[in-house]
Image: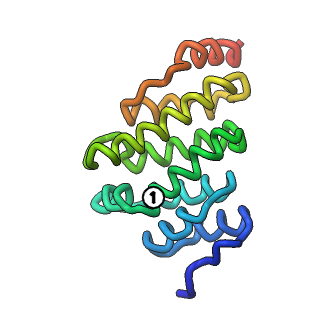
Amino acid sequence: RGPPAPAYLSDEALALAAQNAETLESALDIASRAKGPRALEGAARRLAKAPDGRRCDVRRDHRFLSFLRALRTRLIDDELGPSETANIVVALASLGCCSGGLDRDGRAFEGRAFASIGRRASVSIETYDSAALSSLLWAFTTSKQELACLAKASERFVTIEA
């Protein structure tokens, strides 16, 4: 194993590093540096592969909170497309976000991340294809979070299927 990835790596390089991270510790290091859409998606997918017994540890780690902060910033900046957003929210739900096991502050932080994803989805729901929309709905249902644009999502499904 080499040294941790430097902070100045490009989005593509960080995405590849996250995908190939051998340990959860290195995946968390990379996740805390992820700023671009591909790196955020890659880091989320790698963290979601954490063994069941370690998922709460990942969610309690300060580097995971840095990852969630970067995610919320990219959502606000409109840098994540429907596919990346859906993949990230599925990874977060798979990791157990918003399912308990954390203190009040941790739960609130995860809840704000899901709320940001929901707001971004409601603004751009017409750009979601059926796969991204299904993933989004699955993740919100699994994590027991309210998706404010549920009616819009239903209408979008009808439009796609027509």
Quarter of the image holding residue 149? top right
Quarter of the image holding residue 111? top left
The residue most toward the bottom is 2
Which residue is drawn at the image coordinates 71% and 69% (left, top)?
13
Image position, residue 17 (x, y; %)? 62, 71
Image position, residue 97 (x, y; %)? 38, 45
Which residue is drawn at the image coordinates 65% and 46% (left, top)?
74
Q: Judge whether 141 appears above or below 160 on screen.
A: below
Tell me if 100 is positioned left or right of 78 in this view: left
Q: Which of these two is toward me, 54 or 98?
A: 98
Which residue is drawn at the image coordinates 70% and 19% (left, top)?
160
Image position, residue 135 (x, y; %)? 54, 35
Quarter of the image holding residue 33? bottom right
Tell me if 99 is positioned left or right of 121 in this view: left
Q: Which of these two is toward me, 8 or 151?
A: 8
The quadrant in which the C terminus is found is: top right
Residue at disc 1, secondary structure? helix
Q: Judge whether 141 appears above or below 83 on screen.
A: above
User: Which amino acid type corresponds to the residue marked 1 in the rendered image?
Assistant: Phe
Is residue 135 visible in the rendered structure shown here? no
Q: Which residue is mark 1?
A: 64
The residue most toward the front is 105
Q: Which of these two is toward me, 37 or 107?
A: 107
Is residue 4 visible in the rendered structure shown here? yes
Which residue is drawn at the image coordinates 37% and 40% (left, top)?
108
Q: Which of these two is toward me, 117 or 1?
A: 117
Q: Judge whether 147 appears above or below 81 on screen.
A: above
